[in-house]
Amino acid sequence: MPQAEGGYISLPNNANSNGNGSGSAIYQSTTEPTAPPSVFESVKRVIGQAMKSTPGDSEELLRLERQAVLVNGSTMPVDPMDDIELRSVQLQFPNARGSIVDACEQRRVPTDKGDIHVAIQGDTSKPAIVTYHDLGLNYATSFAGFFNFPLMRGLLENFCVYHVTAPGQEDGAPTLPEDYVYPTMDELAAQLLFVLSHFGLKSVIGFGVGAGANILARFAHGHPDKVGALCLINCVSTQSGWIEWGYQSFNARFLRTKGMTQGVIDYLMWHHFGRNPEERNHDLVQMYRQHFERGVNPTNLAMLINAYIHRNDLHLARTPPGTPGTETAATTLKMPVINITGSLSPHVDDTVTFNGRLDPTNSSWMKISDCAMVLEEQPAKLAEAFRLFLQGEGYATPLSTPASSPCGTKYHTYSSIFFANFREQQLQAAQERERERERERQQQRQLSMRVGNRLRETAINCTTSGSSSNNSTGNTGGNNNDDDNNSQEMDMDLSNGNGNGNRAYVTTTDTAGTLYYGTQTNKIRITENPLPETVSS
């Protein structure tokens, strides 16, 4: 059937093979869609013609590209740029998100099993954090995004990070010789002693993922004085099961003989992301797929996988040694441990088993929701948990300033706000108690001064009154009806400084004019001294 490039075309009237008029009318109202040319081909043809023609011819070619065709007898312009298809677009490993390769000092540390690669990030005079990566990754691909996350950048101001890479797993690593005996998991853990000795580190903080977490746990179990704290993600404390051993054995064989096959890539993706990772983050999954295809040495990775599946048990036990029914050499980790996993990770059960072997007084288990690869899918939650964990262990970590905070203000966590308010409330309460005690002391001083002054005034007045009464009695010749041993009583209000008074009875006795106040059984002699003394009746 006749077609026109770039649009629709009406069929001719004589297109009916039967020759009747009704069929011809039907064909006259029938159109046939045609595929538009490729945008790339159109642009290339226009540029090529423009280079061989005059400017006027170029305008004519552009006008022809925007040609008009007939659709049902009407004219409709069709623009080939209406539909744009992107081709030959490939994802590259995103250095824009913050690569730590340029920010690290690269070192080769000699060990008894060959040299290993160590990247130093930060000031070496600060406390040390030692990281170890998982299968199929290295320090750059495993920790680049996390340690360049805004909440983690402030952490590097107070710490120095030593990124340890397993033998032959760094970027651009040459293939290890055939006769090279790859270190076992225990030997990989023992290599960390050479790293600490090389840099003069007495104690470090471990930060490991997957196979790297297992290596750091082995090192901490064998050298508890060298590790101050551990942050382990998807850590496995037991030996490999039959299913894992079978899958990984086939993967190691394929890596040696055929290279990076699709089956090996699928297993590595499951190991890191769990099931159906494309539904959560398609771009991240494609990025790691391309890394496994192009950035990994298959032979070297096969050796590391073979060492990982032949690991032995960590021999950790929560119960103390000597308990009946437990292994004699089984002890738990003595340093603080934070055990982290993702809710969608295939290693959740392994972390639960590992948590059951740790001391509950110095360990924590955390499961972060909606992720499997915690470092990439939930870096904010992991960074906050790690920072608070270090604060709980006494390390000073500054408050970060994330890009999302308005006006670049400091980002305070709930715990920091709570403790700041608590300290402020305690300080205010202490100041209020001190002010209350000071008021009480002032009131007591004022009361003592008022009582002393009143007692002196009362003694003087009573003495004067008694003398007058005695003189009057002597002048009248003893007309007083009361006996000399009887007393005259008068009321006195002793003020206590608050306006309230105590009623006291002042009694005048004998002719000597000595004054007493109080009851008959307990009389107080009033003198000029503000502190009266008790006399017997």
Image: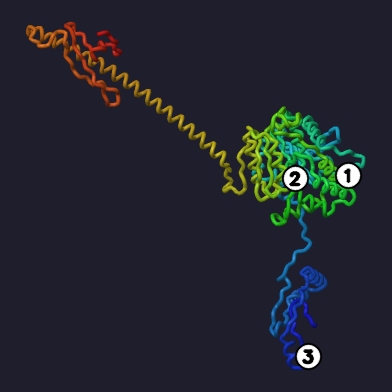
Task: Residue 416: give x, y in percent of width and height.
Answer: 56, 38
At label 1, counting other C-alpha atoms closer than 10 Å, the crowd grade (few under 14, some 14-19, many 20 or more) is few
Q: Say if mark 3 contacts mark 1, CB within 8 Å.
A: no
Front residue of 156/293: it is 293
Circle 1 residue: 175
Q: Amino acid at mark 3?
A: Asn
Can residue 399 be seen here? The reply is yes
Tell me: residue 9, above or below residue 102: below
First in sequence: mark 2 vs mark 1: 2
Q: Say if mark 2 contacts mark 1, CB within 8 Å.
A: no
Alpha carbon distance from label 3 to label 1: 72 Å
Task: Residue 489: give x, y in percent of width and height.
Answer: 18, 16
Q: Secondary structure at mark 2?
A: helix
Left/right placement of residue 151 relative to residue 185 reads left
| Quarter of the figure with the N terminus | bottom right
| Residue at the image point whose x is 75% and y is 29% from the top | 328
Q: Secondary structure at mark 3?
A: helix
Tell me: residue 26, above or below residue 412: below
Alpha carbon distance from label 3 to label 2: 70 Å
Q: Secondary structure at mark 1?
A: loop
At label 2, counting other C-alpha atoms closer than 10 Å, the crowd grade (few under 14, some 14-19, many 20 or more) is some
First in sequence: mark 3 vs mark 2: 3
Tell me, for residue 14, which label it has, or none.
Answer: 3
Task: Residue 287: give x, y in percent of width and height.
Answer: 76, 53
Circle 2 residue: 142
